[in-house]
Each structure stands twice: as structure tokens, then as C-alpha cells.
Image: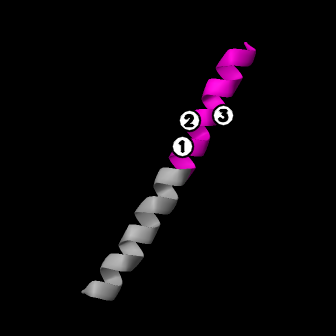
Amino acid sequence: VVNDKLVEHHHIKAAQRLIQLAEAIAELEEEFI
């Protein structure tokens, strides 16, 4: 059970990082257009 929680937490963190990356890339693209 503890392991599942750790894995779940890791996936949430990874997803949040991907969202932040996507937003940063979108902002960069807006500046270059």
C-alpha cells in the first residue's frame, strides 16, 4: 500500500512538471510568433 502511494505521488509530481513545461513552451512560442 505504501509503495502504491509513493508511485502515485511520483506520477502526480511528474504530471505537474509536464504541465509546467507545456505552459512554459507555450509562452516561449507566443514570444517567437
Amino acid at dot 2: His
Amino acid at dot 1: Ala
Classified by dominant secondary structure, the portion drawn in magenta counts as helix
The local crowd at label 1, few if under 14, some if 14 to 19, many if 20 or more residues have their Cα within 10 Å, is few
Q: Which label sits on residue 32?
A: none
Q: Which residue is mark 2?
A: 11
Q: Residue 29's quadrant in the figure?
A: bottom left
Q: Do residues under tags 1 and 3 come within 8 Å of each other at their CB atoms?
A: no
Quick check: 16 above or below 24? above
Q: Which residue is mark 1?
A: 14
Residue 4 x/y as whole percent: 65, 18
Q: What secondary structure is marked by label 1?
A: helix
Q: Do residues under tags 2 and 3 come within 8 Å of each other at their CB atoms?
A: yes
Query: Which residue appears at 33% of the width and 83% of the height?
Result: 30
The magenta-colored residue range is 1-16
Quick check: 10 above or below 13? above
Q: What secondary structure is marked by label 2?
A: helix
Q: Do residues under tags 1 and 2 come within 8 Å of each other at their CB atoms?
A: yes
Quarter of the image containing the C terminus? bottom left
Residue 2 x/y as whole percent: 75, 17
Quarter of the image containing the N terminus? top right
Q: Residue 24's quadrant in the figure?
A: bottom left
Q: What secondary structure is marked by label 3?
A: helix
Magenta-colored stretch includes residue 13: yes
Q: Which label sits on residue 9?
A: 3
What's the coloring here? one colour
Query: Which residue appears at 61% of the width and 34% of the height?
Result: 10
Amino acid at dot 3: His
The local crowd at label 2, few if under 14, some if 14 to 19, many if 20 or more residues have their Cα within 10 Å, is few
Outermost residue to the top = 1
